[in-house]
Amino acid sequence: TAKYNSTEKGKTNSKKRRDKPESKIKAKERAQTPKAKASEKISSKKYRESKKGKAAQKRGQDKFYKSEKGYLATRLKIVAHYSKALSNSDIPCCRCCGESLHDFLAIDHILGKKQMDSEPELLKLGYSSKLHGTDLHKWIIKNDYPKGFQILCQNCNFAKGMKKNNNK
């Protein structure tokens, strides 16, 4: 059957069989057996210990951001700090319009992302405009919330960017 499954016709027929509802139910049942669970546990451990698995961990899946809760807590800490410092608000909010729903809030580069590359204070701290997402969050916390950032909602942040681009 190995030769048959490697042909186009064999691959198509295998896919059809796998996609049948009864095949999916059987596959789920097999995956729930103790033997299958033990096998999965061993294979995932081997993967984590392999070069591929270690490379995946280095790509940002470290303990700091292992869970979504860790990411959100870190982001909320940054948003709260800059909101309090610049907006004089205990509640994280947009510096421009006052939006307080944290899902809509963004960390804004006051001078602009590229312009901040020429700020001597930030360069000493290792800032780069290539930092974004979790890397930017880690950098901000590591460097004790440096000046040059503010909290804006996505709308105000976008409008600010559009205004800058139209003035050039």
Image: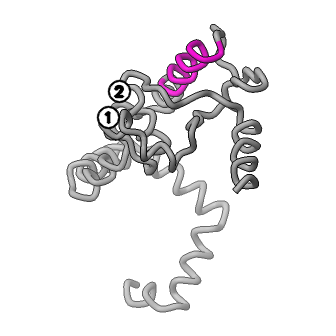
* Bounds of the magenta segment: 74-87
Task: State left or right for residue 120 relative to residue 9.
Answer: left
- Expressed as whole percent of the image width and height from the top left, the position of residue 15 reads 57, 75
- Asked whether 77 falls inside the magenta stretch, the response is yes
Image point 59% across, 73% down: which residue?
17
Secondary structure beneath dot 1 equals loop
Q: Label 2 belongs to which residue?
A: 143
**Number of marks in picture:** 2
Disc nearest the viewer among 2 and 1? 1
Q: Residues within 10 Å of mark 2 (few under 14, many from 20)?
A: few
- Expressed as whole percent of the image width and height from the top left, the position of residue 2 reads 37, 84
Which amino acid does the dot numbered 2 rest on? Answer: Asn
Q: Are marks 2 and 1 in contact (CB under 8 Å)?
A: yes
- Expressed as whole percent of the image width and height from the top left, the position of residue 68 reads 51, 32
Which of 10 and 153 lies nearest the eye of the viewer?
Answer: 153
Which amino acid does the dot numbered 1 rest on? Answer: Leu
In the rendered image, which quarter contains the N terminus? bottom left
Whether 43 is drawn above or below 104: the answer is below
- Asked whether 1 falls inside the magenta stretch, the response is no
Q: Residue 125's mark?
A: 1
Secondary structure beneath dot 2 equals loop
